[in-house]
Amino acid sequence: MISRETLDSAVAQGVITAQQRDQLDALERRSFPGAADDAGSAEENLRLIGGGNDLFVTVGSVLLTVGFYFVLTTLLPDRRAWIAALVAAFSWALAEVVTRQHRMKLSSTVLSLFFVLSFGVALGLEILARHPIQKPESIWQLLALRQQVSSAGYLFLGGVMVAVALYFWRFKVPILAGIFAIAATLLAFLQTALLLYDGVTTGAVALPRLADVPELVRAALYMPLVCGLIVFGTAVALDISDRERRKVWSDCAFWLHVVSAPMLVHPLFIMATGQDVVMGRIQPDANATVMLAVLIVAFVYVALAIDRRSLLVPTLAYFGSLGIYTLIHSTASSTGVPPFALILLVVGALIVTFGAGWQHIRRLIIRPTLPQAVLDRLPPIKHA
């Protein structure tokens, strides 16, 4: 059987038309009924590795890039910015062959990370050379750093975002969507911190007392929550635009869900359960238990609705490491079972259950609870 990815590649290269692809796809479905559904029902279609040859080329790409780096450290000692810039250029040039011509997925992902890391190091070193930031020795020196920190932050994060956008435009590597979202979130954090700083220095915002720090930190959680909602909304929009998940944008959505999940889970968990942000303690009362259960159910339902395990796994991991630990600690104390063992049992059982029967659970929960107009816009619920 010819895979859908091969057919899409044939259309992109002009071998066949889109109409011919659809006709071949329909013929395959008639010849092998249920095969396409079975193939897509078991897993979230993340095209991360292209096979044994892709893995083989990945190892070669890593060795080649690392070897090139050590050659540069010998030829250009104490020129770290130049070395990082040349490694970034080398990664781009290697991607012209590995990614642009052969579309090797894992190799392309690794090379894109090499490029972003080396470009970020080169840019950061150059910015620090032009905008030196020294450790302040007094409050007045700290106040004087505002202009340097803002300029350096804008240049660094803006430059990384531009480089990531250009690399994605050239090579269409999905993981770059997540990196772009992280850089944009950090830029939003920087802007918020500068606005707060300016408000304090001008007197528009009162300088918080020590007793106000916990509440101030709690209020600061709105920033990652808003950024997480924006990233999550973008990922959902990409999912809706490609319900069958056959384009690169669906893979971009996967990484956006991975980035948005921690930004959503952490603030909502703290706000809902009344956790002490400074000391990291949870109030294990009835309200915290109820709110924790509601949050888990809500995240599970949303993950099932949009058919994204990438949203559910970080959620279960976070709730398992923080919420479930506290809420079952009393049970562990009375039975003698270590809390860590109970965490592994609970979270592991949930992951295995949802992983083994994902589409079946989607049919049982999502289909009866959402109107058909909404179901028609969500990823299709496939039959086992």
Image (cartoon, rainbow, N blue to C red):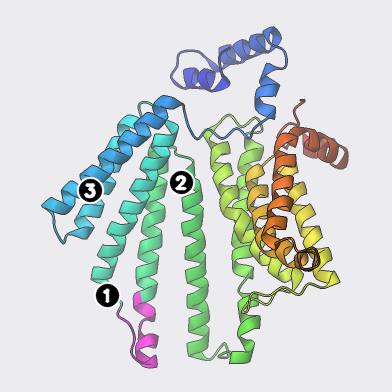
Q: Position of residue 316 (x, y in %)?
A: 68, 53
Position of the C terminus, as image quadrant, is top right
Mark pair 1, 3: CA separation:
26 Å
The spot of residue 35 in percent (x, y) is 68, 17
Residue 176's mark? Answer: 2
Q: Image quadrant of residue 22?
A: top right
For badge 3, the amino acid type reads Tyr
Q: Quadrant of residue 287 in the image?
A: bottom right
Disc 2, disc 3: CB below 8 Å? no
Q: Is residue 173 left or right of residue 307?
A: left
Residue 211: x and y, percent?
63, 90
- Residue 69 circle label: 3
Query: Quick check: is 76 in the magenta stretch?
Result: no
Q: Nearer the viewer, residue 361 or 196?
A: 361
Which of marks 3 and 2 precedes in the sequence?
3
Would you identify the image quadrant in which residue 213 lies? bottom right
The residue that appears at 38% across and 38% down in the rendered structure is 170
Boundaries of the magenta span:
134-148
Mark 2 or mark 1, earlier in chain: 1
Which residue has dot 1 on it?
Answer: 132
